[in-house]
């Protein structure tokens, strides 16, 4: 996983070196661009550290997973708010299709919100152009089910088998086209399973992906 830290550090160093260039210093737009790159890469390293700590705590059962009655529709709406600026920046759209009759269940609001945010960020990250995302919910007598569907680049069957594995990223083509640390979906899986639920993906190359989470109502 060392390259996950080396890449942003290298990018920050290159940006700093560029800003020192007298030609760049005289161009405000280029200075702002490099400053933004530094800020973005710094934020990415921070997220990487946080996710490493989260996974570590989960595996050692040191994470607080206290549960209370929560409304998953509220959780999803809140998560969408968290990524709204990312969506707007990419000229994308998130549409909700709430059909679950029962949406309340015992869960941890903080971590389940993070689960939905992670899944939405994944849909944004792997979309070319404007991300078009649909969120569906439904309920049965025993389960609450929600699906996040994107129209992104999709993934092969082999990638689908590995996508919830820690530090996994598809090693194909220019892997730096997509900035990822390979921890978000591992975290999603850990949290969902701590809620006695399941998560899986259906996808096809070039046709997007559908991530489905199934959580028990009791």
Image (cartoon, rainbow, N blue to C red):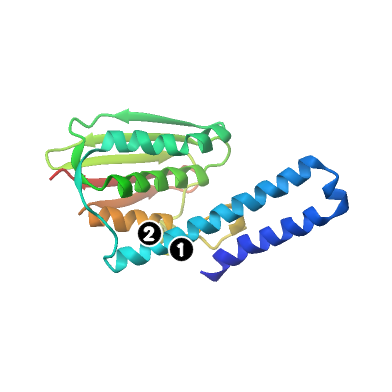
Vertical arrangement, residue 4 with respect to residue 47, above or below: below
Identify the secondary structure beneath mark 2.
Answer: helix
**Dot 2 surroundings within 10 Å: few (below 14), some, or many (20 or more)?**
some
Q: Which residue is mark 1?
A: 168
Vertical arrangement, residue 118 with respect to residue 1, above or below: above
Q: Position of residue 208 (x, y in %)?
A: 45, 43
Vertical arrangement, residue 187 with respect to residue 98, above or below: below
Tell me the residue at 84%/55% (across/down): 21
Q: Quadrant of residue 79?
A: top left
Vertical arrangement, residue 203 with respect to residue 61, above or below: above
**Dot 1 surroundings within 10 Å: few (below 14), some, or many (20 or more)?**
some
Q: Position of residue 43 (x, y in %)?
A: 55, 52
Q: Which residue is mark 2?
A: 186
Mark 1 vs 2, N-terminal side: 1
Q: Position of residue 34 (x, y in %)?
A: 72, 49
Q: Are marks 1 and 2 in contact (CB under 8 Å)?
A: yes
Looking at the image, how many numbered discs can be counted on the residues?
2
- Most extreme residue toward the right is 23
The answer to whether residue 140 shows anywhere in this view is yes
Q: Nearer the viewer, residue 209 or 126?
A: 126
Q: Quadrant of residue 28?
A: top right
Tell me the residue at 46%/47% (across/down): 122
């Amino acid at each position: 996983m060392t390259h996950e830290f080396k890449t942003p550090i290298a990018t920050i160093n290159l940006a700093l070196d560029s800003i020192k260039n007298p030609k760049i210093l005289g161009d405000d737009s280029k200075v702002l661009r490099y400053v933004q790159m530094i800020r973005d890469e710094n934020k990415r390293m921070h997220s990487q550290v946080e996710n490493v700590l989260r996974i570590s705590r989960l595996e050692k059962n040191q994470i607080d997973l206290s549960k209370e009655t929560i409304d998953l529709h509220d959780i999803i709406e809140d998560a969408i708010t968290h990524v709204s600026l990312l969506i707007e920046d990419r000229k994308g759209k998130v549409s909700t299709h709430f059909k679950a009759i029962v949406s309340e269940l015992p869960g941890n609001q903080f971590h389940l919100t993070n689960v939905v945010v992670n899944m939405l960020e994944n849909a944004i990250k792997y979309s070319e152009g404007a991300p078009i995302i649909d969120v569906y919910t439904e309920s049965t007598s025993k389960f609450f089910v929600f699906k996040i569907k994107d129209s992104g680049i999709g993934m092969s069957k082999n990638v689908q088998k590995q996508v919830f594995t820690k530090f996994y990223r598809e090693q194909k083509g220019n892997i730096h086209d997509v900035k990822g640390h390979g921890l978000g979906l591992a975290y999603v899986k850990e949290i969902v399973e701590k809620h006695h639920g399941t998560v899986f993906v259906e996808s096809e190359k070039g046709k997007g992906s559908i991530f489905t989470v199934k959580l028990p109502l009791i």
